[in-house]
Image (tube, rainbow, N blue to C red):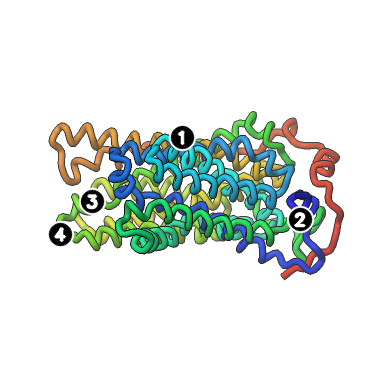
Amino acid sequence: MSILDRSATVAPANYNRWLVPPAALAVHLSIGQVYALSVFKDPMREHFDASHTQIGVIFSISIVMLGLSAAFGGRWMERNGPRKAMVLAATFWTTGFALSAIAIATEQLWLMYLGYGVIGGMGLGIGYISPVSTLIKWFPDRPGLATGLAIMGFGGGAMLAAPLSSTLLANLGDTEVEALTPTFLTMGAIYLVMMVLGAVVVRVPPKGWKPQGWGPSAHRPKLASGQVNAKNAIKTWSFWMLWIVLFTNVTAGIGILENAKPMIEDLFPAVSAAAAAGFVGLLSLANMGGRIGWSSASDFIGRKRVYMIFLGVGAIAYTLVATVGPKSMLLFVLLVVLILTFYGGGFATIPAYLKDVFGEFEVGAIHGRLLTAWSAAGIAGPLIVNGLLDFLEAKGYVGADLYRPSMLVMVGVLLIGFTANLLVRKIPAKYHEPEDAISDHDRVPVRAAKES
């Protein structure tokens, strides 16, 4: 098993750094299937004789476990390298699928919670963070582009998983319910192959490696004036401001995602079911496009400025959705698409933002701890939106009056995030790592690596 060790993954002289993004993408496309879990909702409700909430809990558990496993596994991943982390993620993720198949075959919903939710969720967290610090080390010249390429896969994973799931459900049994067990087993096997192939390809750069002719840009201000470890990072003011930034951006995005289809159907009754489904697909494209587009743009305009756009312009967009959006379907769609690009872009840009603030020393571990904000938003977002909808629906509100209050609440949430972003500042020197500690942490020989 020594081939999984970090020391065994140091890049040879002829290694091309552009192989790392596809390796990361293989992992993220696999774990991005979690966004397509709703494809199984109706057949699982029928099979388990369960409510919407009982099936929805599966997704909630997996997202909570994503944040927790990323937080607790981040430093382990930094010490052991991306290959071992990717293999561990593949093991957890595909074990979750196998246990889910057993849960379906034995009609034990609790085993589904344990398999896909807890164990699969652990695979989500480790898989999500596993390539981040490696990509940043390989692309110090374009960290936003590099992380965007990988994290784009998490948003795009659902676009591959949804048709694949539907095809398997239609062909592996006489009914969708009968097809559930073989579908989960088949998808688990596919994802195991994809993730292991990514682990085989991935490499870490040799110590001291830099792209040919590259040096830190003098014209772009850097918040980082030293390297900070994960333990010290959470003691700083800026970490918690960034936690709030991510929490508010994700909460606001969930505010749209949670009710996209019923919202457009209620606001514009003439819209067909097919058009409403197409609207949801368009939001998936916006989510994915925002991940690569905004994270790449952040390399040129800066991470703090990009988040000012996400949170400031996002608050304006939400205000317009609540007030004038219901009067024009075109305006409504354009505004919601814009908000979803901010949602996706926020996920893809945050690793590079962390590198700007804390340095690259343990950026993967710091990123893992920050992802607890995602877990919290995954609980808070649906509670805020659905709680208000249930309350207002009971009062007899319909149409725009039903959705407007939750949209305006999200404006306030985004303004809190906007303020927190402005308060991110340089890390005091007392939290910086000494140079010898950094050298000991990265005990790999210096070699020449090919720059492409």
Q: Residue furthest top?
A: 235
Residue drawn at x 51%, y 45% is 96
Which residue position is annotated with label 4? 270
Q: Is residue 300 left or right of residue 250?
A: right
Disc 1 residue type (three-letter) = Ala
Which residue position is annotated with label 2? 9
Q: Quadrant of residue 113?
A: top left
Residue drawn at x 39%, y 37% is 109
Question: What secondary structure is marked by label 2?
Answer: helix
Nearer to us: label 1 or label 2: 2
Question: What secondary structure is marked by label 4?
Answer: loop
Disc 2 residue type (three-letter) = Thr
- Whether pointer 3 and pointer 4 mark residues with C-beta atoms closer than 8 Å, the reply is no
Residue drawn at x 43%, y 40% is 112
Mark 3 or mark 1: whose residue is earlier in sequence: 3
Which residue position is annotated with label 3? 324
Question: What secondary structure is marked by label 1?
Answer: helix
**Residue count near mark 4 (Cα–Cα under 10 Å), binned few <14, some 14–19, many ≥20:** few
Cα–Cα span, label 1 and label 2: 34 Å
**Residue count near mark 1 (Cα–Cα under 10 Å), binned few <14, some 14–19, many ≥20:** some
Disc 4 residue type (three-letter) = Ala
Cα–Cα span, label 3 and label 2: 54 Å
Cα–Cα span, label 3 and label 4: 18 Å
